[in-house]
Amino acid sequence: MFTVADQVQLLVNALNGGDHFPVVKLFTPDAGATWLISEVDPDDPDRLFGLCDLGLGYPELGYLSLAEITAVKGPLGLPIERDRTFVADKPLSAYAEEARTNGRIVA
């Protein structure tokens, strides 16, 4: 799901601290869930940090499990996909603020 370059950048972000641009956008093609991922835990590659929007109107920042995300299937049985066209243009906190205002991730 992540390229080697993605994995490196996620790790670099985690080690450097701060408010980073999201590296990867994941989504459910047949449901309303979206994740913007900015970091990976250096000690646990399954533990990611990002903005999570499950389509319920309450997006939030937090930690999530890559294994749990990749196990999710939408109502039509489609797996999570990576948005290969996504290019972040602001830090994660700006996406979070917009998501809180709009009730969903706008990216």
Image: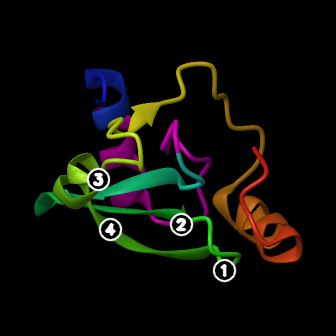
Residue 7: assigned label: none
Q: Nearer the viewer, mark 2 or mark 4?
A: 2
Q: Disc 2 to disc 3, how far (Cα)?
A: 11 Å
Q: Can residue 101 be seen in the rendering of this structure?
A: yes
Which residue is under mark 3? 72
What kind of residue is marked 4? Leu
Q: Which residues are magenta?
A: 8-30
**Where on the picture, by quarter, is residue 47?**
bottom left
Across and down, in percent, residue 14 comes to 36, 59
- Which residue does the numbered mark 4 point to in the structure image? 64
Q: Position of residue 30 (x, y in %)?
A: 52, 40
CA–CA distance between discs 3 and 1? 19 Å
Q: Residues within 10 Å of mark 2 (few under 14, many from 20)?
A: some
Q: Which residue is mark 2?
A: 54
Q: CA distance from mark 3 to mark 4?
A: 13 Å
Mark 3 and 1 residues: CB-CB less than 8 Å, in contact? no
- Image point 79% across, 72% down: which residue? 103
